[in-house]
Amino acid sequence: MKKIIFGITSLTIGGAERVLVDLANRLSEEYNVTIFTIYDGGELKKELNSKIKKIALYRKPYAELSKIEKIKASLKLMIYKNKIFEAIMKRGFDTQIAFLEGPVTRLFASKSYATKIAWIHNDISKVYGNGIKAFIKKLVDGQMYKKYDKLIFVSKENQDDFNKEYKWAKKNNQEIIRNYIDYKKVLEKSEKEENVPFNEKDINLLTVCRLVEQKALDRFIKVQKQLETDGIHTKIYIVGDGPQRYHLQKEIDELGLTESFILLGQKENPYPYIKKCDYFCLLSYYEGYGMVLEEAKILNKPIILTNTAARECAVGYNKAIILDNTYDGIVKGLEKELKNDNFKHLRDTEKNNSNISNEENEELIIRKIKEIL
C-alpha cells in the first residue's frame, strides 16, 4: 500500500482544509495516508477517519501561541525546516503533497526521496500582496516550486497566472484538478438542525468565508450601505471568522448597518445556512476556484460571484450571476437583479442544467488523482 503524506498549515475551518479532509478520507480506503500540520488542533481534525495518521509540528493551534511563540515558530521553520522534515520523511513515504501555498510548500520542498507534489489553490500573482516582503516571498517560493515533480492547480486561470508569474515554469509537469467534495456529506449535514436566523420576509444573502482581505468584505459592507441608500433592503449574513473581524464590525457599526450586515462567526456546519439562504455570494477580489460555490451548487442555490477564477465554477450552472469585480459593478449588478427580485426565477428553478452529476464529477476527480499517485 502506497504511503502518502499531505501537508497543510492547520485543520481550522477553510476551503482547502475541507477539501483535504474529504480527499484524505476517500483516499485512505486505498492508500496509507498521513496528514502533517504545522499547528495542531482545528475544528476539522475530528472529521478525519481513524485510518489517517496525524503529525503536528507544534502541539498548539496557531491562535493559542503567544507572540513570542509565533516568532519562534517562524524562525524554527526557516532555520531547521530541512532537519525537521527529513526526520519525518524517514518514515518512508512514496509521495509528499504540499496542499497549500506558503510555509508548508516551503517545508515540503526540502530534500527527500519521495515524489513531491504542490497543490495550488490561489491566484499566485495576488496572494503575496505588495511591498518588499511580498517580493522576497515570491522569489523564495519560485525557487521552492522548482523542486516539485508535479504542480496541481484547481483552475485554468490559476495555472495561467502562475505561468505568467514564473516564466521558467514547465507545462509538462502541470495539471488542473478541481476541488474534491464529498457531496453526500454536504447534503447530509445540510439537513441537521441549526438556529438559522433568516426571516422569510427578507431577501437573505449569505457568504461563507474567512474574514481576510481577499474576500473583499470591506467592499461588500460599502455596497450594502449603497443598496440601503437606494431603497433596496436586504439582509447580508457572513459565516466565518478571521483577523479582520474587529475592523469589519467597526465599519458595520459606523455605517449604521448593524441590523442588516451580520457577522455570524465561525460555524462548524455552515450547510444549513447555505441551504436556507436566498442567494449565496462570493464577491472576492480574487479566488482560486471557490470550493464553497460548489457546495452551494450541490444545495441547488442561486450564486452571485465576482469575475475571478471562481467563474470557472459557474460554467454550466444556470443559477449563477457573474458581476464586474468593482464596487460600481457589484452595486449596479445587485440593484438590477434585486430591485424587482429578478432573481426569483433562479430560486424557483428546481434543478440546474449541469450536464454532469455530483457523483460523476466526484469520481472523475478521484480518478485523476489516482493516476498521478
Image (spheres, rainbow, N blue to C red):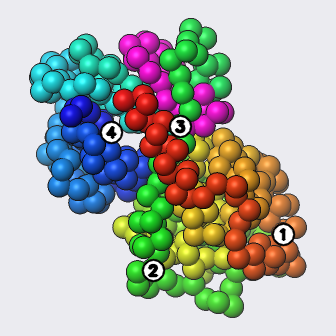
Q: Which residue is found at the position 43% from the left and 36% from the top? A: 369
Query: Of marks 4 and 2, which one's residue comes earlier in the chain?
Result: 4
Q: Can you tell which mark lies on residue 8?
A: 4
Q: Residues within 10 Å of mark 2 (few under 14, many from 20)?
A: few
| Vertical order, 16 against 169 (above or below) | below
Q: Can you tell which mark lies on residue 191?
A: 2
Provide the residue designation for mark 1: 337
Q: Real-space Cα distance between discs 4 and 3? A: 18 Å
Viewer-side label of 4, 3: 3
| Vertical order, 86 against 353 (above or below) | above
Q: Which residue is found at the position 61% from the left and 63% from the top? A: 297
| Vertical order, 160 against 223 (above or below) | above
Please tell me whether mark 2 sits on a helix, a strand or a loop: loop
Name the amino acid type tagged 2: Glu
Name the amino acid type tagged 1: Glu
Q: Residues within 10 Å of mark 1 (few under 14, many from 20)?
A: few
Query: Of marks 1 and 2, which one's residue comes earlier in the chain?
Result: 2
Quarter of the image where the N terminus is located: top left
Contact between labelled residues 2 and 3, with CB atoms less than 8 Å apart: no
Between residues 161 and 373, which one lies in front from this camera angle?
373
Provide the residue designation for mark 3: 177
Name the amino acid type tagged 3: Ile
Q: Main secondary structure of the magenta part?
A: helix
Query: Of marks 1 and 4, which one's residue comes earlier in the chain?
Result: 4
Contact between labelled residues 4 and 1, with CB atoms less than 8 Å apart: no
Q: Is residue 51 visible?
A: yes
Contact between labelled residues 3 and 1, with CB atoms less than 8 Å apart: no
Q: Real-space Cα distance between discs 1 and 4? A: 39 Å
Between residues 291 and 308, which one lies in front from this camera angle?
291
Q: What residue range appears in magenta? A: 130-159
